[in-house]
Structures are given as C-alpha cells and as structure tokens.
Amino acid sequence: MNASGKWRVRQTQDARRDKADIVRWTIRTFGPQQAQIYAETIALALQALSDGPDTLGARQCDDIAPGVFTLHVARNGRKGRHFVVFRVNGDQIIDVLRLLHDSMDLERRLAD
C-alpha cells in the first residue's frame, strides 16, 4: 500500500479515445456547456476510483471478463449513461479499459 492510501488510476488509449468521442458527440448533440458538465461527471467517476475498486457503486463483472469491474459515471446527483470499465493491475493500480454507454454490449466491446 502506498503512503497516501490512494490508488493510482491509469487510462488506456482506448479509454482516452472513448472519453474524447463522448465529449465530441455531446458537443454536437447538446452543446459545449453540456459537454463540459458531462466531462466533469466522467472525471468525478475516474477520481472516485482513487479510493480503490471497492468504491461505492463499483461491481465486479466476471461474466463480462475475469477480473473486470464497472462503475457507472452517475454520481453525486449527476446523471450519466456511461460505465467506467476497469481492472485492478498490481499493487494499488487501476487500469481504466474503456468508457462505454450503458446501452452497449459490454462483453462484445471489450472483446474488440
């Protein structure tokens, strides 16, 4: 355990691309102000992972893939339709694999 007790959260290239795509789509569909709000909502979910995989709302989803967890981005009264898909990687490291819409087939998307 590191001295701060916080977990290190790393985003894969796919996760960073997902976030950029989400923000671009939100700008086109709902405007830049809403895109900023939703980007902040996603950032809050990612920040919550610094408390570890047992953060409120996270659930293990071995049915999707072994060792995979999901965390819905909706939190602190903010709405959201995306999941943070992540895996624990070593000592106090969380790798964010994807940011996927809740209507997507998560298992298929992770296999891609």
Image (cartoon, helix red, strand yellow):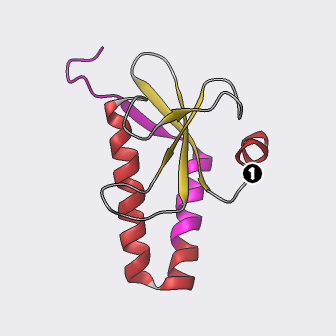
Mark 1 crowd level (few <14, some 14–19, many ≥20, 10 Å Cα): few
Query: Among all residues in the image, which is located at the extreme left?
Result: 4
Image quadrant in which the C terminus is located: top right
- Residue denoted by label 1: 105
Location of the N terminus by quadrant is top left
Residue 84, given in percent of the width and then of the height, sits at 52, 46
Give the side of residue 25 with respect to residue 79, left or right.
right
Q: Which residue lies at the image location 39% right of the left edge and 49% below the top edge?
A: 45
Q: Where's residue 81, x and y in %?
A: 54, 62
Does residue 11 belong to the magenta stretch?
yes
- Residue at 66%, 27% in the rendered image: 62
- Residue at 62% over, 57% down: 102
The amino acid sitting under disc 1 is Asp
Q: Does residue 77 show up magenta in the picture? A: no
Write down the quadrant of residue 85 in the picture. Answer: top right
Q: In this view, does 29 lie above or below 35?
A: below
Relative image position of residue 37 (x, y in whole percent)? 36, 71
Q: Nearer the viewer, residue 91 or 106?
A: 106
Instruction: Tell me: residue 83, above or below residue 25.
Output: above
Q: Is disc 1 placed on a helix, strand or loop? A: loop
Q: Give the range drawn in magenta.
A: 1-23
Expressed as whole percent of the image width and height from the top left, the position of residue 57 reads: 43, 41
